[in-house]
Image: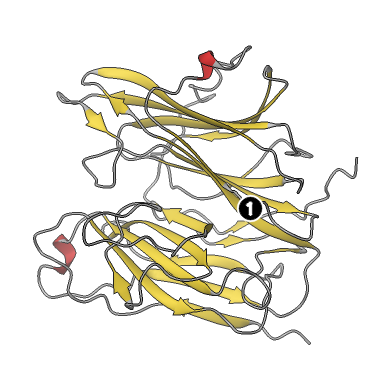
Amino acid sequence: MVTLKTFLFYREREGVSKGSRNDYDRTLKQGPKEGFRASDDFGFEAQSLKKAAHHILLFGCEEPGSDEETWDCGEMNTDGKGQSTPCAGWPRILYAWAMNAPPLDLPKDVGFEIGGATRIRHLVLQIHYASVTPFEDGSTDNSGLTLKVTDAPQRYKAGTYFMGADGKIPAKSKVHLETACSYDEEPRLFPFAFRVHAHSLGEVISGYRIQEGEEWTEIGKQDPQLPQMFYPIEEKGLVIQAGDVLAARCTMNNYKDKTVMIGPTMSDEMCNFYMMYFTDSPHLPENDICFNGAGFKWKDYFENIPDKEASELPAKQEETDEKPTEMKMDSMEKDES
């Protein structure tokens, strides 16, 4: 018999500054002392309304970035004056949510491993509040994540690989922000879901595997104005292995009269692509973050760039007011070659 345990990151949000329209907050919880793994019943479910929390990130840390229960933390893994990073040192992104995305269930036999002998001793939740207007009447916020975990061993370890790009979008212009990194580690990665994230200027975000500097295989692409959920990867049997390159592009359309920079606030922009994967290796890759600065361009490094395909969607998809249905990933059968 397997006993499912639920960790509910859920608390009354107090002390939100009325003067700040964008607020990053981290809620800290101690990880389990014994090892837990995710089962096919394992998943992530956010508790938030889009008008309050714009997006939520869950980090696995050896040590948290602060001893406080909550702290100001800037954006992603950066810090600044009066701020601390989510993790002190090594961070691992486990999950990301935005735009009223539905719950996510993992495939059978796939799970994120936390606690025990792993490097994940703490779970740290980052919440980016789009606006503090809902709290101005004294209301509190219950934004958070519900996690179900089990102590039953799972066949494959899961992870999330993050790609992001820095840069600026000049006024009244359409530009591409791009990033790419060589994957040089031993574990083979089998991607099964992807997620994109931008603010109001993002039109299309796409991710690719590149082999030999010229052979491009799409991991996924999506309109970031739709619910920012993890979508299933259509390319079955896709494998990332040492020597491959992982790349992402954000097509941004700035209709405003001023230049917009990549940054942490709602008046800034973001260019993020998340790839959720499993591996048959006993350990995950040491590095699962790829970020390039302003000025990085695919054309300076690669050939046969799928320029049109990377920047356009097959057909315009309509966003509805209804909450999308719960996402359940199919059972994954990896290529044994």
Does residue 101 appear left or right of residue 2 in this picture?
Answer: left
Is residue 260 or residue 317 the one in the foreground?
A: 260
Q: How many marks?
A: 1
Q: Residue furthest right?
A: 337
**Quadrant placement of the N terminus:** bottom right
Way the structure is coloured: secondary structure
At label 1, counting other C-alpha atoms closer than 10 Å, the crowd grade (few under 14, some 14-19, many 20 or more) is: few
Q: In this view of the protein, can residue 129 be seen by the observer?
A: yes
Depth check: give the residue in front, 1 or 244. 244
Q: Is residue 257 left or right of residue 106?
A: left
- Residue 322 visible in rendering: no
Q: Quadrant of residue 130?
A: bottom left
As drawn, 13 above or below 74: below
Give the residue number, with chain letter if any, for mark 1: 286
Quarter assignment of residue 318: top left
Of 26 and 227, nearer the camera is 26
Which residue is pictured at 83% across the width and 47% down the height?
334
Where does residue 139 sit, x and y in percent of width and height? 17, 75
Q: Is residue 45 left or right of residue 76?
A: right
Quarter location, residue 301: top right
Residue at 75% x, 84% y is: 2
x and y, in percent, of residue 263 in the image:
29, 41
**11 over 159 or under it: above or below:** below
Q: Residue at x 17, y 64 (%)?
A: 134
